[in-house]
């Protein structure tokens, strides 16, 4: 049978001269190699503009395309670049020169209601009825999670409505199923509706999430720990690490005078010659002998504070000097009225003696103490609010009525596409070239009407 058919093809081709055929672009073949195959000059490549030349690399190996050939001469090639545009390689009838162009693909749209009755296997049943093999797989994909197509039984029916581009009498590109219903022997039909984005839904309504994003003013507080310069840490210890031998008091027993006396300072026990450091920065307002206190330095720190360092063995600063916190101002001794080497340290605020330890940090020399600070803020903040809303799928209600009417019909039916295996096209002759027909190559400059080799 096949041999007979082939014989007919050759006979027809000889009779009519030109033959159109669907070919498959060889994997890895370049456009330049394709030209070479038909002995077409490579000069053609130079005539392709920079903008168009990029499309040459868009040709996909394995993709079908159309050729119109006469003997070994290529008259025209139409190579699709997606579903809408194609490369046209056209031989001028008179000069024999080739022209390169990118032109629209001519197609029409077919819309059809299909009713399939399952006999054996739903894919082969749909394919046999429609001769559009992509439909079965598309239906299966749309019904995924809802109907298992492998479990359909003989006698079950599928109704669906779909759109398909049609080119040269064959399905072109991807089919678009807009609605479907699967009806088992028992139970209600299971409907499916497809929205504009191609999503399938089981109901005529869908629940959509509405995400609203905006800005709003929010108030919040933050609590953090900060270092603060507090009065407790304003003054550092003059002899770091030294032991306190006598604290500040307004009344204490004086071991030398044998009576009660106030002690208006703090004594730090240390060896003779231990360096004494300025408790804070300031100006030396006194450096010299002061009766019972022996060798003394007084420093004015501002804000009414004055510090006093008594019983020193040797002074290191002079009146009028500016000293920094921690700077050595002299050395521990036992000058004046003293029982042994130590530093008597006095602190005065606005001329009145105060307890120095109340103004000193616990850590050695620390000016800073930590405090927790709570801050109130106002800020424009982005917020996102998600709500759900039920919206009708456009046209779904009408689609449901339509599918119900299809299911009410008794017999299976469908638009029947040509059998791709038999669909070889022959061009009658060049004289009728200007008569336009459907599809290729009607719109392509030289219109060549076609004749289908066989009828289904
Ligand atoms: Zn003292």
Image (tube, rainbow, N blue to C red):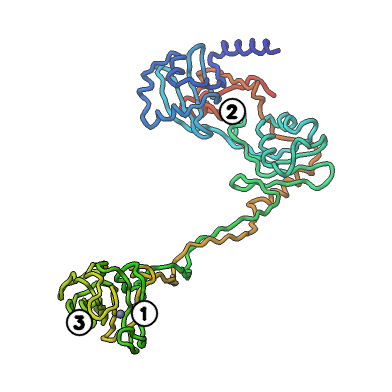
The residue mark sitting in front, 2 or 3, is 3
x then y, percent, for residue 91: 44, 19
Q: Quadrant of residue 376?
A: bottom left
In the picture provided, is 398 more to the left or to the right than 189? left
From this view, report whether residue 223 is shown above or below residue 149.
Answer: below
- Residue identifier under label 2: 168
x then y, percent, for residue 118: 79, 34
Residue 55 seen in render: yes
Q: Nearer the viewer, residue 383 or 377?
A: 377
Instruction: Look at the numbered disc 3 and give the secondary structure of its residue.
Output: loop
Q: Is mark 1 within 8 Å of ligand 1?
A: no
| Residue drawn at x 55%, y 17% as measured from the top left | 19
Q: Earlier in the sequence, mark 3 or mark 1?
A: 1
Instruction: Look at the numbered disc 2 and give the secondary structure of its residue.
Output: loop
- Residue identifier under label 3: 290
| Residue drawn at x 46%, y 26% as measured from the top left | 88
Residue 303 seen in render: no
Q: Quadrant of ligand 1?
A: bottom left
In the picture provided, is 362 more to the left or to the right than 159? left
Q: Nearer the viewer, residue 243 or 442?
A: 243
| Residue drawn at x 20%, y 76% as measured from the top left | 295
- Furthest residue in direction bottom, as rendered: 259
The residue mark sitting in front, 2 or 1, is 1
In the picture provided, is 410 more to the left or to the right than 379? right
* Measured Cα–Cα span from mark 2 to mark 1: 111 Å
* Measured Cα–Cα span from mark 3 to mark 1: 21 Å
- Residue identifier under label 1: 247
x then y, percent, for residue 204: 69, 52
Q: Quadrant of residue 257?
A: bottom left
């Amino acid at each position: 049978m096949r041999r007979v058919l082939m014989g007919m093809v050759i006979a027809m081709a000889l009779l009519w001269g030109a033959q159109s055929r669907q070919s498959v672009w060889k994997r890895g073949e370049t456009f330049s190699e394709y030209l070479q195959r038909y002995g077409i000059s490579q000069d053609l490549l130079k005539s392709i503009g920079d903008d168009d030349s990029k499309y040459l690399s868009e040709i996909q190996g394995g993709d079908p395309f159309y050729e119109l050939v006469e003997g070994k001469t290529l008259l025209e090639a139409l190579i699709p670049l997606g579903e809408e545009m194609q490369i046209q390689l056209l031989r001028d009838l008179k000069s024999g020169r080739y022209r390169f162009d990118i032109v629209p693909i001519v197609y029409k749209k077919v819309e059809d209601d299909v009713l399939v009755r399952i006999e054996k296997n739903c894919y082969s049943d749909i394919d046999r009825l429609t001769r559009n093999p992509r439909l079965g797989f598309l239906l299966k994909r749309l019904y995924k999670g809802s109907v298992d197509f492998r479990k359909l039984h003989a006698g079950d029916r599928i109704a669906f409505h779909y759109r398909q581009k049609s080119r040269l009498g064959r399905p072109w590109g991807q089919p678009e199923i807009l609605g479907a219903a699967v009806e088992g022997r028992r139970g209600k039909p299971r409907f499916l509706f497809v929205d504009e984005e191609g999503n399938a839904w089981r109901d005529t309504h869908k629940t959509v999430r509405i995400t609203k994003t905006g800005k709003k003013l929010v108030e919040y507080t933050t609590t953090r720990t900060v270092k603060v310069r507090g009065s407790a840490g304003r003054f550092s210890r003059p002899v770091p690490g030294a032991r306190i031998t006598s604290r500040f008091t307004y009344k204490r027993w004086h071991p030398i005078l044998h009576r009660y006396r106030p002690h208006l300072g703090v004594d730090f026990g240390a060896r003779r010659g231990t360096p004494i450091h300025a408790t804070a920065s300031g100006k030396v307002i006194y450096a010299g002998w002061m009766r019972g206190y022996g060798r003394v330095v007084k420093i004015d720190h501002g804000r009414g504070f004055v510090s006093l360092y008594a019983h020193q063995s040797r002074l290191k600063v002079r009146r009028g000097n500016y000293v920094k916190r921690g700077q050595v101002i002299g050395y521990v001794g036992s000058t004046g009225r003293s029982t042994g080497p130590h530093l008597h340290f006095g602190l005065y605020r606005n001329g009145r003696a105060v307890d120095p330890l109340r103004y000193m940090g616990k850590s050695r020399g620390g000016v800073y103490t930590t405090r927790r600070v709570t801050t109130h803020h106002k800020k424009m903040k982005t917020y996102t609010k998600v709500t759900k809303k039920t919206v009708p799928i456009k046209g779904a209600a009408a689609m449901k009525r339509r599918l119900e009417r299809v299911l009410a019909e008794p017999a299976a039916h469908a638009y029947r596409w040509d059998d791709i295996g038999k669909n070889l096209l022959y061009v009658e002759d060049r004289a009728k070239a200007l008569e336009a027909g459907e599809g290729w190559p009607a719109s392509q400059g030289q219109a060549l009407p076609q004749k289908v080799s066989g009828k289904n």
